[in-house]
Image: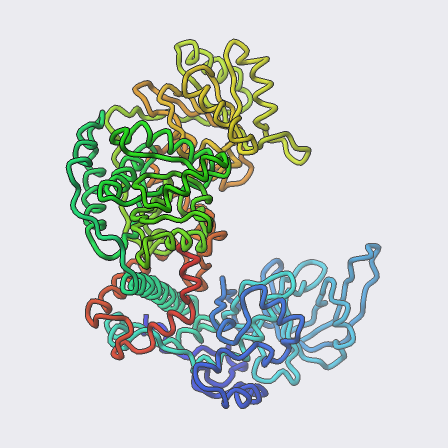
Amino acid sequence: MEAALERTPDRPSGYTPRALGTGEALGSDELLAASLMSLPRPSILDAPITKLKGAGPKLSEAAAEMGISSLGDLLRHLPHSYRDRANPVGLGDLRLGEEATVEVEVAGAKLRPTRRRRLTILEADVFDPSGKVKAVWFNRAWLADRLQPGVRLLLHGKLEKRGFNVSEHEFLDGAGDSAGLHTTGIVPVHPASERIRPQKLREWVWQAVPMARHAVEPIPGRLRRELRMAGATDSIVASHFPIDEHQAEAARERLAFEELFLYQAALVSRRGQRVASNKGVELAPPGTEVAKWLDSLPFSLTGDQQRALKEIDDDLGQAQPMQRLLMGEVGSGKTVLALYAMLRAIEAGHQAALMAPTETLAEQHFRTLESLRASDATKTTLLTSATPPVERRELLESLASGQPQLVVGTHALIQETVEFSSLAVAVVDEQHRFGVRQRAALDAKGPGKRLPHVLHMTATPIPRTLSLTAYGDLDTTALRELPKGRQPIRTRVVDEEHRAAAYEFIRERLREGRQAYVVCPLVSESELTEARAAEAEAKRLARTELREFKVALLHGQMSSQQKARAMDAFSSGEADVLVATTVIEVGIDVANATVMLVEGAERFGLSQLHQLRGRVGRGSHESFCILFGDPESEAAKARLEAIAGEGDGFALAEVDLSIRGEGEILGTRQHGLPRFRAASLPEDTALLLEARRRVLELRARFGSLEAAEIGPLLDEARRRFGDERVEQVAA
């Protein structure tokens, strides 16, 4: 990597600027350098981009919307691609249809009238020693006054029958050191917006790149030597203005490692601070009550569950509060492990809580825990916004008095009016749906100044790369093994031509005594979409294809009582078919349901489809998933092909990451996961794993990431990925 960055990038012969990365300003931009010299390092890179020529208030505001406010932001706004533009060729050597760069002189120019109001065509007669041609610009009328006879230009474009269509141009006369910036050599293309074109960003970076010498070097020198890694300054310069694409990729890879290295340092530091500054409720080893409960279970624990129990036991026996992420395949038995952790707290005379993101899921957990709990002596209560006032008051009094019990609830558990006397264990289900403040509020419910042990659960398997970024400060436990007797689910994607056959198949299963789900993407009909709506579909099925059977309806806009009645009807077998929205995505467990039909399957994400499919196949009967989909995009086609061909949730999670990228999977854009500027996952998985390994090695070697021998690593990690941003990521 280092060897690839040894050469100094410049422009082709005849357009060579001063050397980059040497601390020398570029031509007229010496004023920029002089204006920044009074600032202490690294504050120079914190200077606003308004210091740059052409960065006025409006463009600076547009840049801020892209995350570019300072010179440092700009220098780390890396190109997404490069255009390889060779040395200028003579006009006489141009070939029809080929792109080229030419150096020409203007003979004359004029605007050509058109019938279309919004279209302007500017034509200029240009020449060089080898020939002449007509250069053509579209919608560039403002250039006409500047194209006077004798003006010299660099043009990049394509020769066509009507002339040389210009895509980019530069004026050579008086252009100074930046001549050829847009039209010759390896030209960087930076991510842009509607208000800021790539050309403007390129000009700004060209002005700012001499300041790269003030970049902080966060990677310790010994580690850089071991990895044969170039310095930060050389890498920044080469990433923007490389000699060739090989050098560009070497620079990006170095900066990507630095980015992932700093982020992992921030995560590791954050976890260390929580452990050092807070104490949990240290629990004694499990006693006879918990042992009796384990023996009473009507099934045997899988090997994965047994290993998870040991990890949970080890955590609960520590004075440091547990922070563990339990991610499991659909139906892998996470709830049993959650109940085990909570019973450990209750056996020790403390309290435990399970928080779910929706009332439906909280109510389902309550029913499941009631059926699995140790004995009638274990008090289990439910607290949601629908809890009647009298019951709510009694529950709050018992929690405040310290009565050992297990409470299940929604966000209602973290309201200020809810006071736990001795909350020792908290379980957060579908934890990525909760924000930082909500999780902090749950932490605050611990006894005195101690924090509760927290077990985070997700039914969405998380790719390893994402788990190390979004959840890098948590211990992770994965449940891949399914309980014995679980039947594989046969999945098929069908089109409208096979709808009649699909419903006949469902009727056959219902006549056998089984039950079925029908999932719709919407609650009610909309004029803006043709997607089937749950309310309308439930009525339609009840009077047409499934009129022989009892059809129930369930969606999130129903009252708590209505949802409870619908679920009770389906769970008891009174209803044969449950038409629902994705409110049934997690937590619903009806062993007799063997068919899942999903309408508009192309509208759902891959992990969501896998979750929906997981509502069947929970008993001893063969189960099926029917996906009605009409995908138009390649991504939607890839999702449906993947779900039909793969049953393993962890494998599907990796596919999902490769299709959507780290910024969208699991809704992480909404939950704070930063869009890395240089790194790209999953492509840079190897860099991520190496970065984390090296961070942990440094901490083990020096005892802390704040050791003087490590240098400014942690300061830079906090500056770029401060505690607030890291906490958002963990949300």
Instruction: Classify residue 647 by image quadrant.
Output: top left
Visible in this render: residue 145? yes
Q: Is 91 left, or right, of 453 in this rendering?
A: right
Residue 137: image location, x then y, percent: 71, 65
Foreground of the two, 486 or 570: 570
620 with respect to 242 (left or right): left
Question: Where residue 232 sits: x, y (%)?
Answer: 38, 75
Q: 723 above or below 526?
A: below
**Relative horizontal placement of residue 281, taking residue 628 as reference (left or right):** left
Q: Nearer the viewer, residue 717 or 649?
A: 717
User: In which quadrant is the N terminus drawn?
Assistant: bottom left
Rendered residue at 41%/13% (across/down): 509
Residue drawn at point x = 40 percent, y = 29 percent: 588
Query: Is residue 665 visible to the viewer in this orientation of the structure?
Result: no
Give residue 337's quadrant in the image: top left
Q: Find residue 212 and report its horizontal and vertical position in percent.
A: 45, 79
**Compared with residue 503, is residue 72 higher up or lower down, i.e. above or below?**
below
Q: How many marks?
A: 0
User: What residue is rendered at 28% in x and 41% in y?
Assistant: 342
Observer-nearest residue: 377 or 590?
Answer: 377
| Whole-percent x, y for residue 2 in the image | 32, 73
Residue at 43% over, 13% down = 510
